[in-house]
Image (cartoon, helix red, strand yellow):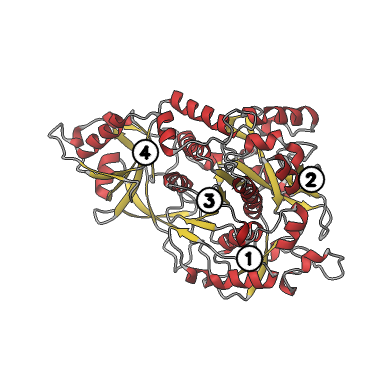
């Protein structure tokens, strides 16, 4: 990799590494197991461990990066759209190369002498055997396997079963070690597909014609024609694509894609531009899409509907076998020219993230991307205010990364009247609320204050009144008219799928089309869009009914005029957004 520096250092003849003092890292991590992962054998000298040492930035420099991010992202700023280069981001963070060298030197004492450093100089990647890792991190490593993984899928990971440490001389230089304590959130049995998520029967129901635009197998479901009729975006042909315009989706946990299903979707829906992936980072295994009842559902949903919206604009897939959102964002930031719009349909509750250090470190990566002009959209979650953790503790569980102030969170809606293209209402399972970790950012402060002063709020014991509100915007994603997708690997199966994992690629796709307008006119990509969104709230279809109290719970947030923590600012009105940009 031309962007990766390689170092080999000779181990100095210093105090024996085994005698060096160690300092515990991420002290907030208290659990070293997961209910979905089965403890296995202890890792041995024959097992390879790959981790990333994330170097610690001066907080003042991180604050400066945030300031620069907001300057280039605020339409009222004189430097709006003047995004930073990689070197300019490095200059803002101003991490001394001596820090990198000092960590490298300390690693050499443990006979770890071949490492790689990312292009920003702030992440050191290590490959070592498990015994070397146990010695370096003063911990114990075991294999773990996911209890629901299909037999043909290798889901084993090596993780620490007790706290990890770093040698004293490294501990002040490193923020976290990624790849030791966080367990992937794997879903092998999606809840967004199947009989429980099918809409009521459509026979005898008067439906708008667009609901029959993908053939009888999709009758009554949301289709590309439904979305285009509701949100009003144009069809981008191959001759219309602006130079440099692209969109990307991120996939994890064996979510690959296959041409049979993409071709079947293209044909069934009569799309002018075929559903195809222009490039893949991380590889693809199409054969996996025909294994199991619901294989590749998430990725095919992302790809089929992203392409349905963006037309001929090229689509990229980032596939990560490490299941790490952090690794994904690092990969995007190391790209010479990342796609200007990125959509991610994965996340977890803040409380499930193991440590605040991890979330703040990940935020720095989001800020880097935004400062470079990359828009990142995240699904807001499919469990309403309670999150994946559920009603335990009788407090709401906000989502991460959706509740990060440096991404755009996308919630889900339903049509207010089934099979009628028109007003939308909040989907009761759409994730939303207020962060327990991050403060209200300035770009949404007025909108949040207005909601709190005018809406009927749940008991204050349930949520953090000073937290960042999410989602920012929404798109169709609920179960009244689920999305129709082709899946199964053979191009013969169609089914209805619901979730904010449908809403995110659709909303992101609309902004990829908006980027096309700006880039074709010689402008810059929109980049981090949140300041623009809140300054142009009237460019969205306001959603004022519904509540995200999934499962029949009484507590939740009501949709209301303007921004609300059920649907954000509402759903895109392309014509108004195009005028605003």
Mark 1 highlights which residue? 273
Label pair 4/1, CB-CB below 8 angstroms? no
**N-term mark: 4 or 3:** 4
Indicate which label's residue lies in the foreground, 4 or 3.
Answer: 3
Q: CA distance from mark 4 to mark 1?
A: 52 Å
How crowded is the residue under tag 2: few (<14 C-alpha within 10 Å), some, or many (20+)? many
Report the residue at 53% width, 32% height from top: 69
Question: In this rendering, is residue 483 above or below 524?
Answer: below
**N-term mark: 2 or 3:** 3
Point out the residue furthest to the top here.
60
Which of the 4 image quarters holds residue 570? top right
Q: Could you tell me which secondary element the residue under label 3 belongs to?
A: loop
- Residue 526 placement, left or right of 27: right
How crowded is the residue under tag 4: few (<14 C-alpha within 10 Å), some, or many (20+)? many
**N-term mark: 1 or 3:** 3
Q: Nearer the viewer, residue 482 or 371?
A: 371
Tell me the number on the disc at residue 244: 3
Question: In this rendering, is residue 392 above or below 57?
Answer: below
Mark 4 highlights which residue? 163
| Residue 548 can be seen, yes or no | no
Indicate which label's residue lies in the foreground, 2 or 3.
Answer: 3
């Amino acid at each position: 990799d031309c962007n990766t520096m390689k170092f080999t250092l000779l181990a100095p003849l210093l105090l024996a590494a085994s005698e060096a003092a160690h300092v515990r890292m991420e002290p907030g991590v208290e659990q070293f197991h997961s209910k979905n992962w089965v403890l296995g054998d202890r890792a041995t000298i024959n097992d390879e461990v790959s981790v990333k040492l994330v170097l610690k930035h001066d907080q003042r420099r991180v604050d400066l990066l945030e300031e620069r991010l907001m300057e280039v992202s605020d339409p009222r700023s004189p430097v709006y759209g003047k995004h930073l280069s990689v070197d300019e981001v490095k200059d803002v963070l101003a991490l001394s190369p001596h820090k990198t060298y000092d960590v490298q030197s300390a690693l050499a004492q443990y006979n770890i002498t071949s490492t790689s450093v990312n292009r920003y100089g702030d992440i050191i990647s290590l490959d070592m055997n498990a015994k070397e890792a146990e010695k370096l991190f003063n911990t114990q490593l075991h294999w773990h396997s996911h209890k629901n993984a299909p037999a043909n899928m290798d889901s084993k990971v090596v993780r620490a079963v007790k706290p990890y440490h770093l040698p004293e001389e490294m501990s002040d230089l490193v923020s976290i070690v990624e790849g030791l304590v966080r367990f992937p959130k794997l879903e092998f049995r999606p809840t967004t597909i199947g009989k429980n998520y099918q809409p009521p029967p459509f026979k005898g129901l008067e439906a708008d014609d667009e609901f029959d635009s993908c053939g009888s197998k999709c009758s009554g479901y949301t289709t590309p024609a439904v979305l285009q009729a509701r949100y009003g975006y144009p069809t981008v042909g191959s001759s219309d694509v602006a130079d440099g315009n692209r969109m990307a989706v991120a996939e994890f946990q064996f979510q690959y894609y296959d041409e049979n299903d993409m071709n079947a979707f293209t044909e069934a829906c009569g799309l002018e531009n075929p559903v195809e992936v222009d490039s893949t980072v991380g590889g693809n295994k199409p054969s996996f899409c025909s294994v199991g009842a619901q294989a590749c559902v998430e990725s095919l949903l992302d790809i089929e509907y992203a392409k349905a919206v963006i037309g001929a604009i090229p689509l990229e897939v980032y596939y990560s076998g490490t299941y790490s959102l952090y690794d994904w964002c690092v990969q995007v930031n190391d790209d010479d020219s990342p796609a200007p719009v990125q959509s991610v349909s994965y996340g977890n509750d803040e409380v499930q993230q193991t440590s605040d250090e991890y979330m703040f470190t990940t935020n720095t990566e989001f800020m880097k991307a935004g400062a470079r002009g990359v828009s990142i959209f995240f699904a807001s979650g499919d469990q309403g205010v309670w999150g994946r953790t559920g009603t335990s503790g009788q407090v709401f569980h906000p989502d991460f990364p959706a509740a990060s102030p440096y991404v755009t969170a996308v919630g889900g809606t339903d049509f207010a009247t089934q099979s009628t293209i028109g007003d939308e209402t909040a989907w009761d399972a759409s994730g939303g609320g207020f962060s327990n970790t991050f403060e209200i950012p300035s770009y949404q402060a007025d909108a949040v204050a207005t909601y709190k002063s005018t809406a009927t709020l749940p008991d204050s014991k349930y949520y953090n009144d000073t937290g960042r509100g999410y989602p920012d915007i929404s798109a169709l994603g609920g179960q009244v008219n689920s999305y129709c997708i082709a899946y199964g690997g053979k191009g013969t199966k169609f089914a209805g799928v619901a979730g904010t994992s449908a809403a995110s690629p659709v909303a992101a796709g609309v902004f990829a089309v908006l980027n096309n307008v700006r880039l074709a006119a010689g402008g810059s990509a929109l980049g981090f869009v949140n300041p623009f969104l809140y300054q142009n709230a009237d460019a969205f279809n306001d959603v004022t009914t519904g509540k995200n109290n999934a499962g029949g719970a009484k507590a939740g947030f009501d949709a209301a005029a303007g921004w609300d923590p059920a649907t954000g600012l509402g759903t895109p009105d392309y014509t108004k957004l195009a005028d605003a940009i």
